[in-house]
Amino acid sequence: MERAYYVTTPIYYISGNPHIGHAYTSIAADVLARTARANGPAFALTGTDEHGQKVANAATAAGMSPHAYVDSLVPRWHALLEKYDAQFDDFIRTTEPRHQTACVKVFEQLKASGDVYLGKYEGWYCTNDETFWLESKLIDGRCPNPECRRPVEWLSEDSWFFALSRYRDRLIAYFKANPKFLRPQSVYNEMMVTLEGGLDDLSISRTNFDWGIPLPGGGVMYVWFDALLNYITAIGWEHDTEQFKTLWPASVQLVGKEIARFHTLIWPAILWALGLPAPDAVFAHGWITLEGEKMSKSLGNVIDPFALADEYGADSVRYFLLREAPFGSDFSFSIEKLRMRHNSDLGNDLGNLLRRSLAMLDKYRSGLVPAASESRLGERFADLGASVRERVGNMQFREALDEIWNLITALNREIEEKKPWTLHKEGLDVKLDAVLYDLCEGLRWIAILLYPFIPSKANEIWRQLGLRDTPSIPWEEHLQWGGLAAQTQTNGGDALFPRIDPPVPA
Ligand SMILES: [Zn+2]
């Protein structure tokens, strides 16, 4: 079987609030998967991380059992994906039997190979972050996480350990041999520093609470160890080897930079211990800040992703998030910039192009697409599909959109320069047909190329062009200038991106 493009998001911590950062990662994964699907098989995975003491505590506070509590929270994660049109082939919950069974099997297998052994864990523990901290890292005796700073407690218990330290040299060699394994470069460099500083074995069991995957002989699995395994348990590591073989290793795993350490130091080591290859690539995207400040509940500057999509439209937000800043950098969010992108790029450049083109076709040719002829534009953009695909594959979403916009700009310029209304007045029908054809054909290309980014508006362009089904079709075959059939009956309609004006100050 052909290997599929396999992309993952981190599984989202169930008791957190879905915020714009979750939408950001999910949208990026969706764009990758939709682009890949247009060119071959693809599989996108997301899900929820449901274990740990923090969840157990929150359930108690809510007067619920942990199980009932997590069940009550899952729907809002599905709702977020639906709100942003992010399509996933699977959604794994770490409380599912398929995950738990496989995790225990991993544990047994690693115990047998000696990669997991029994030791004693003592150290400073932050319950909130479910992390042990070195004494040297504590700040005034408190948790060093700047978002947390809660008191830590001294924990001493028998614990199972994963022999992470024995994989350090292999990790260093792997990083050096695969400079694109972890991007962007800044995070790669940071992880190299960590590696050179040495790695401790990882405590992977807990006995001070029981909301986790029960381990044979007592205790539960450390929530991070269980969480990482989702990327293989979901695709059948233990129960569907056929599917597993077509999907693993993952093509790319998207993470926020704060969890790059787990995904690029611990995760490959676990995989190697299981005799599996590391993922092809891990990409750590930046944080979304609100006009420069990190968003957090305590600062009260959190953007509600549901309200945002309701107000501006999911496609406009999707476009904005991937166009405004390079994917690996921090993203400075601002409503003003979102509104500008919506009105200018989407409304003026794209929406007006569609409206004007179809209006002229309607007026001069009763809405019927003329026959194709030689086209300079067709020659100029012949490689556009291949280059957009390559950009997207490299997580250069902004650059991919820039390239698509070159075509949009060229089509708008075509209208300004060729002046179809003059051609019509002067009776230059052959020239007029050529311009009208290029406009419609260019719009067909744009719908195909923008479909991964703005799926519902791309569908609308497709519909107004009078085309059947959806623009989700193989690029190589369909991005051939001249593919739009003569005599296609278009139906120009409503504005694609109605203008949004800033609220009038009271
Ligand atoms: Zn903490």
Image: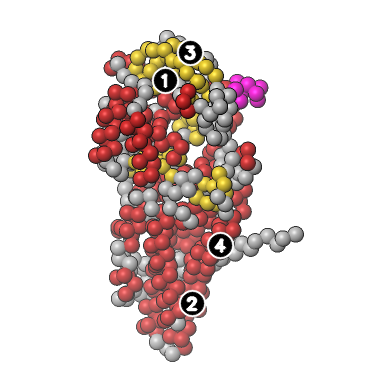
Per the picture, the main secondary structure of the magenta-coloured stretch is helix
- Depth check, mark 4 against mark 3: the one in front is 3
Of the image marks 4 and 2, the number of the one nearer the N terminus: 4
Q: CA distance from mark 2 to mark 3?
A: 77 Å
For the residues carrying marks 4 and 2, which lies nearer the camera in this image? Answer: 4
> Local crowd at mark 3 within 10 Å, few (<14), some, or many (≥20)?
some
Q: CA distance from mark 3 to mark 1?
A: 14 Å
Identified at 44% across, 49% down, the residue is 329
Give residue 486's position: percent from left, percent from top.
37, 71
On screen, residue 441 versus residue 499, left or right, reads left
- Label 1 to label 4, Cα distance in Å? 48 Å
The relative height of residue 408 versus residue 424 in the rendered view (above or below) is above
Q: Residue at x 43, y 70 (%)?
A: 409
* Residue identified by numbered label 3: 156
Q: Nearer the viewer, residue 269 or 98?
A: 269
Pointer 4 or 3: first along the chain: 3
Q: Is mark 1 within 8 Å of ligand 1?
A: no
**Badge 1 amino acid:** Ile
Q: Which residue is mark 4?
A: 340
Q: Residues within 10 Å of mark 4 (few under 14, many from 20)?
A: some
- Gap between marks 4 and 3, in whole Å? 55 Å
Q: Identify the residue shown where x is 51% and y is 55%.
A: 320
Three-letter amino acid code at disc 2? Met
* SS state under label 3: strand
Return the residue at label 1.
Answer: 204
Alpha-carbon distance for marks 4 and 2?
27 Å
> Where are the magenta residues, as a range?
57-68
Q: Which residue is mark 2?
A: 360
Of mark 1 and mark 4, the one earlier in the sequence is 1
The type of residue carrying mark 4 is Met
